[in-house]
Image: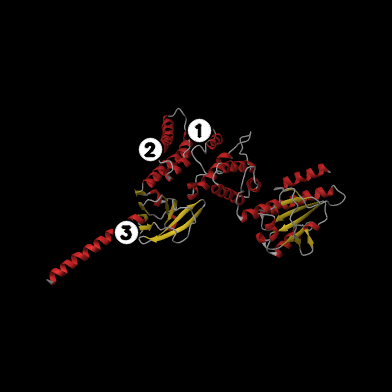
Amino acid sequence: MNKLRNFILHITLTFLLFTAGLRSCYAQEKTSFLKGRINNYANQPLYVYQCYGDTLLLTDSTTSDKNGEFVFLKSLSKIQKTNLDNEAGMYKIVLQLNQFFYILYNDSPIEIRTVYQSNAFFNSAMDSLTVLKSDENKHFYEFQHFQQGINIASSWLLQMMRLYPRVDSFHIQIENEYFKRYKAIEQFVFHTSLSRQERSPANLIAKAYYQPILPDWKQPDAWRDSIIALHYFDYFNPADPFYLNSNILPEKMDLFLVLATNKLNAYGQPIKDEMLTARAAQMFLEKTKSSRINFNFCLNYLLKKFSKEYLNNAFLFLYDYNTKPQIGDCETAIVSRKVKEKADQLRNIAINSIAPDFEIDNQLNLSGIKSEYTLLLFWATWCPHCTSELPEIKKAVTEFNKETEAAKLLTLAVSLDIDKEQWQKYIIGNNLLSFLNFSELKGWQSEVVKKYNVYATPTMFLLDKNKKIIAKPETTEQLISAIKTIKQKE
């Protein structure tokens, strides 16, 4: 009897454990966000970042087991609250040594297989990835494959077509390969099951990168880029809220600026004009205005980009145009505190502004200098370009002053040196005593350097007797030209 009772108890416990295991597996399957196996990646860390514009938000981490298998549960934002409307969007899974892959999450479990290899040139984790579960990600990675083919066609094959004689039979093969790749992605975007899922993340990504027209390859790149820019928004709507939950908007903004500003002058030389860049940026922003949150993100991104690249005129144009209420606007753009501070700083040193005042050696202020004109010159002894330009600058100033009864143009030379002895020795050794020399001996951390947004040396500001900025010459030649303009007005 005892043996029978123990046998029944054993069977019962086994059944309970088995059903509990099934429930556990079912629960894990139901709540799984992402699981998979990474070959050659045993007992290693993985990190999940949610993509939000140009930011990666750390949401979870785990460690693979001895077989390289891992599981991320659906309860995201364990490490950092993302403050996003929902968890759907694009995620970046980061492995060791800068290996990573992307996945699209849309409230359905995902399973993948991939391979890890430590390689500085190839991202094997993404290149080798196979999606086992999730139609969304199968479409996404299929599109990635087609897109890679288009990128090759747009670079190598395009140049090969231009190099090989058209009468060469190999040219025909290259051209066929070029068009085949484009037709393949067109077929995928518009004639597969993906095209019927209008609002799916994979469809939105495909539409964002699909190029609706293939310009004549025989035409110059500048012409081709202008055609692509003209059709840039045919299928891509940057106001769509999904794009903010991905890394797509920054990349699409950068690419549009390149395409829209690739212009040549009458001599076939590239046109370098900040306002060309500013107008292209504004064209992109106009396409986002139906979504205030997308518009604000894109505006702040572009302003930060222009600030970092020292496109000061483009920065002020974009800032002023979009932060001043327009007719019919019920609210203004929201920009960061740093962006506002940058705008104020640039406005203070714009042409026709009164130059920001500062104290010189605790004795004199810039505003107290009595001269018809003042050349404010930022330089340093350790700057080779400065040491080669300074004699020419001094010569230009001296010649201008020789033509007048009294010295009209005073040079205030602000040094970025931190070694006082080296600075003073250079001044004496190079006969710069005719300059009014000043330095806080703090290098780039000097307050006056920050106030004038100096990011390169030499930097010059030409001021009138009221200390109004009348010119910002970038070279000695431009300084001489500005001085000639002064002479003509007198």
Residue 431 figure quarter: bottom right
Whether residues under marks 2 and 3 lie with C-beta atoms below 8 angstroms apart, the answer is no
Camera-nearest label, 1 or 2: 2
**The N terminus appears in which quarter of the rendering?**
bottom left
Residue 21 seen anywhere in this rendered image of the structure: yes
* Residue holding disc 3: 67
Query: Mark 2 is on which residue type?
Result: Thr
Query: Mark 1 is on which residue type?
Result: Pro
Query: In the current view of this chain or complex, which residue is farthest to the left?
Result: 1
Q: CA distance from mark 1 to mark 2?
A: 25 Å
* Residue holding disc 2: 192
Residue at image coords 39%, 47%: 137
* Residue holding disc 1: 215
Residue at image coords 66%, 61%: 445
User: Residue 66: image x %, image y %?
Assistant: 32, 61
Please state which of residues 287 and 291 is positioned toward the viewer in this rendering.
Answer: 291
Q: SS at mark 2?
A: loop
Q: Earlier in the sequence, mark 2 or mark 3?
A: 3
Residue 380 seen anywhere in this rendered image of the structure: no
Q: Earlier in the sequence, mark 1 or mark 2?
A: 2
Left or right relative to 415: residue 49 = left
User: Residue 9: image x %, image y %?
Assistant: 18, 68
Q: Earlier in the sequence, mark 3 or mark 1?
A: 3
User: Residue 448: image x %, image y %?
Assistant: 70, 59
